Image: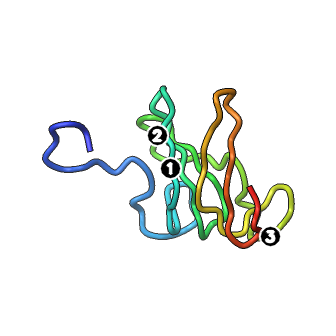
Amino acid sequence: WVEGAKEGIVVAGGQREGSALTQLSYPQGLFVDTLGTLYVVDLRNHRVMRWTQGAKQGTVIVGGNSRGAGGNQFDYPFGLSFDRHGNLYVAEQDNHRV
């Protein structure tokens, strides 16, 4: 919601549940950086997505390689954060790891 707005604006997803770059499936944690870029944990697609301001679709920045325990896979990620150096940390449920 933009401050003072009477209604909100969809900035990510909003195209029904799915795995396309315009869709999310159970979005969880999110983070907005100083440039207004939005990062979203896409729980059931096992990935982290990024939307730049005004983008019509997101970009998979990590995961999205089906559910699993590999170094490039997640098993129900649900939270994320960045440190001051720009490193991304993702907490995931079923692999019990960050």
Report the Cα–Cα distance between label 1 and label 3.
22 Å
Amino acid type of disc 3?
Gly
Which residue has dot 3 on it? 68
* Image quadrant where one finds the C terminus: bottom right
Relative side of 77 to 36, left or right: right
Residue sitting at x 66%, y 68%: 76
Looking at the image, residue 24 sits to the left or right of residue 47; the answer is left
- Quadrant in which residue 81 is drawn: top right
Given residues 7 and 34, the one toward you in this image is 34
Image position of 69 (left or right of 55): right
In terms of sequence position, does the residue under pointer 1 or pointer 3 come before the other?
1
Query: From what the image shows, is residue 69 above or below residue 29?
Result: below
Left or right of 95, for residue 49: left
Above or below: residue 85 compared with residue 69 = above
- Residue 60 vs 96, above or below: the answer is above
The disc label shown at residue 30, or none: 1
Residue sitting at x 67%, y 64%: 46
Q: Which residue is mark 2?
A: 55
Q: Residues within 10 Å of mark 3 (few under 14, many from 20)?
A: some
Few, some or many C-alpha atoms within 10 Å of disc 1 (few <14, some 14-19, many ≥20)? some
Mark 3 and mark 2 lie on one chain; the one further toward the N terminus is 2
Element assignment for label 3 = loop
Mark 2 secondary-structure assignment? loop
Quarter in which the N terminus is drawn: top left
Mark 3–mark 2 Cα distance, whole angstroms, equals 29 Å
Identify the residue at horizontal 29%, vertical 48% (top origin): 9
What's the amino acid at mark 1? Leu
Which dot, 1 or 3, sits closer to the camera?
1
Q: Tell me how far mark 2 sits from mark 1, CA to CA.
A: 16 Å
Q: How is the image coloured?
A: rainbow
